[in-house]
């Protein structure tokens, strides 16, 4: 029985040591659990911050994407405007060339008209001069034909008189 008692004491001492070790281990585990809980809380806080940052980044990405779409739309509009302006520029250059050609033709036509006007003025001046000469000649003819007309009347009267005498 002493042996049993001794064995029981040994077991009790061993159990007490095991209990102390278990208490130390429990205390250590509690400390570790507390540290892990603090670490978990810290990580949860960081995770919340990361999620918030991620959400903000998503919003920024959406805003950037929207801005890029706006820029692309504006770029396309600018390209279309440039294409339209290039077409208008080509048309304007074509009209300018046509206007230059028309100006050259107009200058040529004006020069021809001025030449024709000079020629017509010369012809008019010649005709006016001829008219003056003819007017002078007509006046001279009138002066010379007036006495002839009187002579013709006198002769005509004499012819009647003579015809009357012969009858």
Image (cartoon, rainbow, N blue to C red):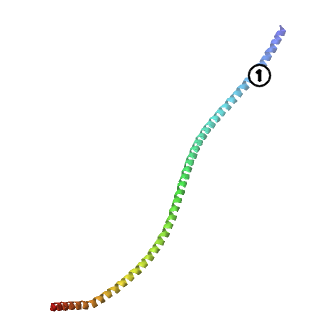
The image shows residue 99 at horizontal and vertical percentages of 49, 65
Residue 59 in which image quadrant:
top right
Q: Residue at x 56, y 50 (%)?
A: 76
Work out whether 109 lies above or below 88.
below
Q: Residue at x 39, y 83 (%)?
A: 126
Most foreground residue, 125 or 152: 152
Q: Horizontally, is 105 left or right of 39 in the view?
A: left
Q: Horizontally, is 157 left or right of 11 in the view?
A: left
Mark 1 surroundings: few (<14), some (14-19) or many (≥20) residues within 10 A: few
Q: Horizontally, is 121 left or right of 81 in the view?
A: left
The image shows residue 22 at horizontal and vertical percentages of 75, 21
Q: Which residue is mark 1?
A: 21
Q: Residue at x 50, y 70 (%)?
A: 104
Q: Residue at x 82, y 12 (%)?
A: 7
Most foreground residue, 162 or 87: 162
Most foreground residue, 15 or 115: 115
* SS for callout 1: helix
Furthest-front residue in this view:
167
The image shows residue 137 at horizontal and vertical percentages of 32, 88
């Amino acid at each position: 029985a002493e042996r049993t008692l001794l064995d029981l004491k040994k077991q009790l001492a061993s159990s007490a040591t095991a209990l102390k070790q278990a208490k130390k281990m429990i205390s250590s585990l509690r400390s570790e659990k507390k540290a892990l809980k603090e670490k978990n809380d810290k990580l949860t806080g960081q995770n919340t911050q990361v999620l918030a940052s991620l959400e903000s980044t998503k919003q920024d990405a959406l805003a950037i994407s929207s801005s890029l779409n706006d820029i692309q739309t504006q770029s396309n509009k600018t390209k279309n405007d440039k294409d339209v302006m290039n077409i208008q520029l080509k048309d304007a250059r074509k009209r300018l060339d046509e206007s230059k050609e028309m100006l050259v033709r107009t200058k040529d036509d004006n020069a021809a008209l001025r030449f024709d006007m000079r020629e017509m003025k010369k012809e008019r001046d010649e005709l006016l001069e001829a008219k003056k000469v003819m007017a002078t000649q007509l006046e001279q003819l009138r002066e010379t034909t007036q006495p002839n007309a009187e002579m013709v009347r006198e002769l005509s009267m004499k012819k009647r008189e003579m015809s009357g005498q012969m009858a």
